[in-house]
Image: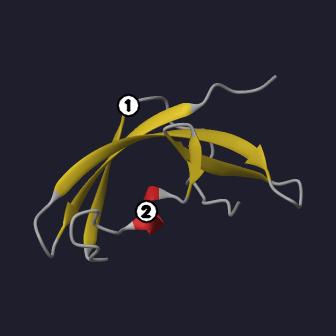
Amino acid sequence: MEEAPIRESYSFLCQACGHGWQEVYEIRRVHDSRGLIQSAFFLNGRRTPSPLTQGRCAVCASARVLVTQRTRGRRPRGGAMMEVSP
């Protein structure tokens, strides 16, 4: 039985220019090439890197971005989320 995706909201703040924004990610559990269960992040239906590793401002392109998480859905059982490379 497949689990329902988890929805989590992340807020971003650029330390260089002060631009702030928020995105809601859908997180799905997937099997990697070794058969292990990992978490895959989706934004607007497209697979994307973890928001914790993304960190580029759309206004000034600075990598000096703070990321905070505000959970909107249920949390997965068993620990931390991990990024899965496409």
Residue sitting nearer the eye, 83 or 44:
44
* Label 1 to label 2: alpha-carbon separation: 17 Å
Crowding at label 1, few (<14), some or many (≥20) Cα neighbours within 10 Å? Answer: few
Residue sitting nearer the eye, 48 or 27:
48
Query: Residue 60's quadrant in the figure?
Result: bottom left
Say left or right for 38 vs 58: right
Residue 28 in the image: state x and y as whole percent: 64, 39
Say left or right for 28 vs 11: right
Query: Residue 27's quadrant in the figure?
Result: top right
* Residue reaching furthest to the left: 18
Residue 6 in the image: state x and y as whole percent: 54, 33
Residue sitting nearer the eye, 84 or 45:
45
Residue at which label 2 appears: 52
Residue at left offset 15%, top offset 76%: 16
Say left or right for 12 vs 36: left
Q: Which mark is residue 12?
A: none
Residue at which label 1 appears: 72
Residue at left offset 63%, top offset 45%: 78
Question: Disc 1 vs disc 2: Cβ atoms closer than 8 Å?
Answer: no
Residue 75 in the image: state x and y as whole percent: 51, 36
Query: Residue 18's quadrant in the figure?
Result: bottom left
SS class, disc 2: helix
Residue at left offset 56%, top offset 37%: 45
